[in-house]
Image (tube, rainbow, N blue to C red):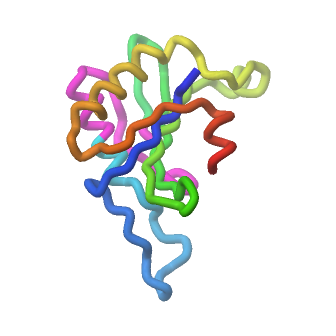
């Protein structure tokens, strides 16, 4: 299932830090994660404030009693590489389920993916929106 959104946009900060900055500085994408939080909240989807993850931002939420997580980050995609924003949608599971069950994308999140897609498509600042699966993403990133 195509659960990863790729798009281009100048609406979010993707400027590189200067050479003399801390290599552990806050990753790009906080403004993109805040944008997604707002768009989902407008659809009455319960979402938490974005939290910093490794290399990006995580937006956790609850949609129709299904816990989900969106990992939002910047990525250089293509040849030559160009700036892209990435949203990786995942079901949030407890420890035991994450260890012993399949990591395939759960069909239960398809309605959330549709809502995300509709919000992104309606925004004129979002360009070249593409949905891909994990294998396709692994091949290009």
Q: Which quadrant of the structure image shows residue 100? A: top right
Percent x, y of residue 112: 40, 20
Quadrant including the N terminus: top right
Q: Determine the residue positioned at 21% across, 41% down.
A: 124
Q: Does the segment drawn in magenta span residue 38?
A: yes
- Residue 99: x percent and y percent? 77, 27
Residue at left offset 35%, top offset 27%:
117
x%, y% of residue 129? 39, 38
**Direction from residue 4 to residue 37 in the image, left or right:** left
Instruction: Return the residue nearer the eye: 83 or 29.
Output: 83
> Which residue in the rendered view is the most extreme toward the front?
79
Q: Is residue 95 magenta?
A: no
* Drawn side of residue 29 relative to residue 102, left or right: left
Residue 105 vertical placement versus 89 (above, below): above
Relative image position of residue 56 (x, y in whole percent): 49, 53
Q: Nearer the viewer, residue 66 or 13?
A: 13
Q: Is residue 125 above or below residue 98?
A: below
Name which residue lies at 61% across and 40% down: 137
Q: Which residues are magenta?
A: 36-59
Q: Residue furthest right?
A: 100
Q: Image quarter for residue 123?
A: top left
Count of marks placed on residues: 0
Query: Looking at this view, is 106 or 53 the one in front?
Result: 106
Please determine whether, in this image, residue 88 is positioned above or below residue 18.
Answer: above
Residue found at x 75% / y 19%? 101
């Amino acid at each position: 299932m195509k659960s990863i959104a790729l798009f281009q946009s100048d609406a979010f900060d993707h400027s590189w830090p200067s050479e003399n900055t801390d290599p552990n500085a806050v990753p790009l994408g906080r403004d993109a994660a805040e944008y997604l939080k707002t768009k989902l909240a407008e659809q009455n989807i319960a979402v938490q404030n974005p939290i910093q993850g490794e290399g990006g931002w995580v937006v956790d939420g609850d949609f129709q009693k299904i816990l989900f997580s969106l990992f939002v980050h910047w990525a250089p995609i293509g040849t030559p590489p160009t700036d892209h924003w990435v949203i990786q949608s995942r079901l949030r599971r407890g420890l035991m389920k994450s260890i012993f069950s399949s990591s395939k994308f759960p069909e239960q999140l398809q309605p959330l993916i549709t809502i995300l897609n509709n919000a992104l498509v309606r925004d004129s600042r979002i360009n070249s929106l593409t949905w891909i699966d994990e294998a396709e993403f692994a091949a290009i990133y």
